[in-house]
Image: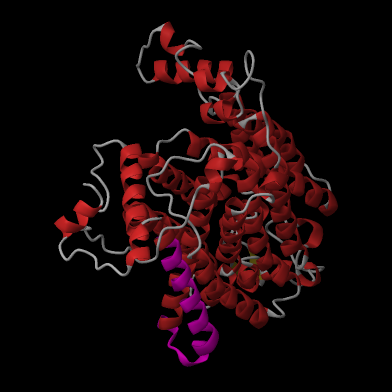
Amino acid sequence: MSRTGGVTRACPAQTAVWVACRAQGFQGLEPGLREEGLRAVPRCWRQPCSSRELTAAPPQWDLVCSNHWKVPLEQTTYLLGWLCGCLLLGLACDRFGRRASFVGSLVLAAPLGVGVALAPDYVMLLVLRLLLGAALAGAFLALYVARLELCDPPHRLMVVMVAGFFWVAGELLLPGLAVLCQEWRVLQGAVTLLLAVLAVCASCPWLFPESPRWLLATRQLDKGRRVLRCLAEGNGVTLGDDFYSREHLFTELDSLSEGPPLPRYHSVCEIVDTRVIWKNSLILGFTAFIGNGIRHCFTRNLAPYPPRFYFSYFLLAATEAVACLCLCLTVDRFGRRAMLLLCTILTGIASLLLLALTQYLLDSVVLTLSVLGITSSHAVAMLSILFAGEVLPTVLRGSGLGLILAASFMGQATAPIMAIRNSRGFFLHHVVFASFAILSVLSIMLLPETKGKALPESLEDGERQRRPALFQASRRKDRLPLLLSHSQDDSQSYARLVTATKKLLGSTHRGPRLLPATPRAYGSCLGT
C-alpha cells in the first residue's frame, strides 16, 4: 500500500492474494492471523469511506470491520462441506466404485464452481461453497483410495507422498495464480476450468481405470478380469486368453456359489460389529482429529514475524513439504506405528512447552517450537490417513476412510470456529488439544503394523490384524528335543507325544520318578 496525496492506494497483487486465499479456504491463513490478514487490506476498506477516493474496488458484501466474523464463518462452512462429502461420498465410493465416485464428484464440482464465481450475495456464496466442498471431498477421497489400491506394498508410501508434494505445489502456486487473476471471481473460474478439464480426462477409462482390487473384493469378476487385462497390456505384458479364463482365475470365488457370483456390497455400519477394525478406526480418527486441530495452537505464534502475510502462508506450505519428505525417508524404515508415535510425542511436547513457557522463552525459541509443532502435526495427520487406508478392508475402505477424513476436517474446523468468537477460549482450546495429544500416545500402541503388508480385502482379513509386541523377545534355541523334526509327519509326532505323556502320568501311581538328567535320555522317554 502507498499513500499519494492523502489517498490510500492498495497493492492489487497483495489484495488479490489475500482475497483469493480466503476464497479458496486455504488454511494457511489461520483465523488467529486474521488481524494480520486484514492489514493486507487497504485501511480505507476497514474504515468508513464516504469521503475517500479508492483506487481499487472494495471487498464485496462488506466482510470487514463489524462483519469480519463472516470470513471465518465462510471457512467453517467450506470445511463442513468437506466433512459431509467425506461421509456421504465415501458410501458411494464403496457402492458404485472409485472411478464412478471420482468422475461424478468432478462433474458436480464444475457447475458448483461456476456458481460460486457468480454468487450474487453472501448467503448464496455460503450454500455453494458448502456444496463445492462436498464435491471436492468426494473426488479427493476416491482418488486417494484408488491410489492406495493400485500400488504394491513397497511403493505405496512413495506414491502417496508424491501426491502430497503435488498438493503442496498447488498451495505454492495459488498466490501466483491469484496475482495473475487479480479478482477472486476470475480465480474461481480458472480453478473451475481446471476441474472441468480433469473431469473430461478422468472420463477416459484408460486414464483412470476402476480399482481391480475393489472389483474382485465385491465379486465383480468379469469387470475385474477386463481391468486386469487392460493394466497388463498397458504395462507391456501380453498374456494368453487362457490366463484370464474362469478356470485359471477366480476358481475359488466361483466355487462359492452356483454359477457366476453376484456382486456383494457392505455397509459402513458393519464396522461397528467388528472389534479390531472398529478399534483401529477410532484410534486413527482421533489422531487425525488432533493433528489438524492442534495446528492452530502453533500458527498463532507466527503473526509477529514480517512479512506478516507471506511469511505465515509460505511457512505453512513449506512445513507440509518437510513433513512429506521426512515421512518418505523414515516410515518405510521404522514402520508406521513407530513414526506416528514419534510425531505425536513431538507435537504434544511442543504444545505443552508453548502452553506453559511462552512468556518466558525467547522469540526464536517460540518460533522454533511452533515450526516443530506445525511440521509434526502435518506428519500426524498425513500418516494417520495413510495408516487408516492400510488397516481398513477393501470392501469398506471408502466409507471407513471417509470417517477418518471427516474427523480430520472436524479438527481443522475448530480454528475458524474460534475466530468467529475473536479467539475467545483459545487457552482452553490449547489445553484440550495438548491433553488429547498426550492421550493419543497411549492409544497408538494398540495399532498393528502395516509396513510391507498387503491390504486387507475382507472384514475377516481386517479382524486378523494384531498389534506387534512392543519389545521383541530374543529367540532362544530349545535344546531339548521334545518334538520330532519338522520333516516327519505331524500326526506321528502328536501320537508319540501323547504316548510319552501317558507314560509319565502313569508313573505317578508307582511313586515319584525323577526326570532323566540328559537331553538324550529325556528324548528316549518320548520314543525319539
Left or right: residue 338 compared with residue 79 = left
Tell me, yes or no, whether the highlighted magenta stretch contains residue 355.
yes
Tell me, yes or no, whether the highlighted magenta stretch contains residue 228.
no
Residue under the point 51% across and 24% down:
207
Left or right: residue 46 compared with residue 402 = right
Residue under the point 67% across and 21% down:
262
Tell me the quadrant of the picture where the N terminus can be found.
Answer: bottom right
Name the spot of residue 401 as percent of width and height, x first: 60, 47
Residue under the point 69% across and 55% down:
79
| Any part of residue 58 in sight | no
Name the spot of residue 84 as percent of width and height, x first: 73, 49
| Any part of residue 103 in sight | yes
Left or right: residue 289 compared with residue 456 = right
Q: Could you say which is closer to the camera, residue 416 or residue 246?
A: 246
Name the spot of residue 220 as percent of width and height, x first: 60, 22
Residue under the point 39% across and 59% down:
322
Name which quarter of the figure residue 261 lies in: top right
Q: Which residues are magenta?
A: 339-364
Name the spot of residue 78 as percent of width and height, x first: 71, 53
- Residue furthest to the top: 241
Q: Could you say which is closer to the camera, residue 484 or residue 222?
A: 484
